Image: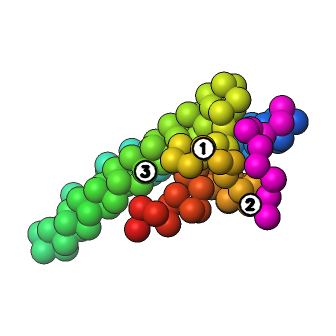
């Protein structure tokens, strides 16, 4: 059983800050790749292909653009959630469950560093 503490220590918060900053950097690189892929898909040079093939390709291209947009939106939300976690670190409220007020387990925060709910609170939602 974990001891009940009000918050993580400054040293622990710094560990999480480093972890989160690394995740933000990677997520921003991934988002740039998604956007670059979207731009590169704009012109596939199908002007001289048959009309039937072109219709299939345009359908696939539309689907690909939608998938890219969904991926980009998810990535943007992930980055926003991570940046919000950095704000909580600065405010020294990081790792405190917003439902129970207890500390979120370190293992959970390492796996999901932007978590705002403990496993107990998450299970209560189901």
Mark closer to the chain start, 1 or 3: 3
Q: Does the magenta stretch include residue 111?
A: no
Mark closer to the chain start, 3 or 2: 3
Q: Find out whether the residues at labels 1 and 3 contact each other: C-beta distance under 8 Å.
A: no
Q: Is residue 9 magenta?
A: yes
In the displayed structure, 69 sits above or below 91; it is below
The residue sitting at 56% across, 49% down in the picture is 100
Q: Read off the residue under disc 1.
A: 101
Q: Read off the residue under disc 2.
A: 107
Mark closer to the chain start, 2 or 1: 1
**Rendering coords of residue 93 (x, y %):** 65, 33
Image quadrant in which the C terminus is located? bottom left
Image quadrant in which the N terminus is located? bottom right
- Please state if 38 lies on the left or on the right of 55 as rendered: right
Q: Which of 33 and 40 is in front in this view?
A: 33
> From mark 1 to mark 3, how far is it between C-alphas?
28 Å
Q: What element carries label 1?
A: loop
Q: What element carries label 3?
A: helix
- Please state if 100 lies on the left or on the right of 58 as rendered: right
Q: Can residue 40 be seen in this view?
A: no
Q: Find out whether the residues at labels 2 and 1 contact each other: C-beta distance under 8 Å.
A: no
Graded by Cα atoms within 10 Å as few (under 14), some (14 to 19) or many (20 or more), the crowding at tag 2 reads few
Q: Is mark 2 on a helix, strand or loop?
A: helix
Q: Nearer the viewer, residue 108 or 38?
A: 108
- Residue 94 lies in what quarter of the image? top right
Q: Which of the two discs, 1 and 3, sits closer to the camera? A: 1
Q: Read off the residue under disc 3.
A: 74
In the displayed structure, 120 sits above or below 95; it is below
> From mark 3 to mark 2, how far is it between C-alphas?
23 Å
Q: Which of the two discs, 2 and 1, sits closer to the camera? A: 1
Graded by Cα atoms within 10 Å as few (under 14), some (14 to 19) or many (20 or more), the crowding at tag 1 reads some
**Rendering coords of residue 37 (x, y %):** 45, 51
């Amino acid at each position: 059983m974990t001891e009940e503490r009000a918050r993580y220590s400054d040293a622990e918060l710094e560990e999480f800050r480093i972890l989160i900053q690394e995740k933000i950097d990677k997520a921003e690189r991934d988002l740039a790749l998604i956007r670059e892929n979207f731009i590169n898909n704009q012109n596939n040079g199908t002007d001289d292909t048959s009309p039937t093939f072109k219709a299939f390709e345009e359908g696939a291209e539309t689907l690909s653009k939608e998938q890219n947009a969904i991926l980009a939106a998810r990535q943007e939300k992930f980055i926003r959630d991570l940046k919000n976690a950095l704000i909580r670190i600065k405010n020294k409220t990081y790792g405190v469950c917003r439902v129970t007020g207890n500390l979120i387990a370190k293992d959970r925060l390492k796996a999901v560093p932007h978590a705002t709910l403990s496993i107990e609170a998450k299970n209560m939602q189901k």
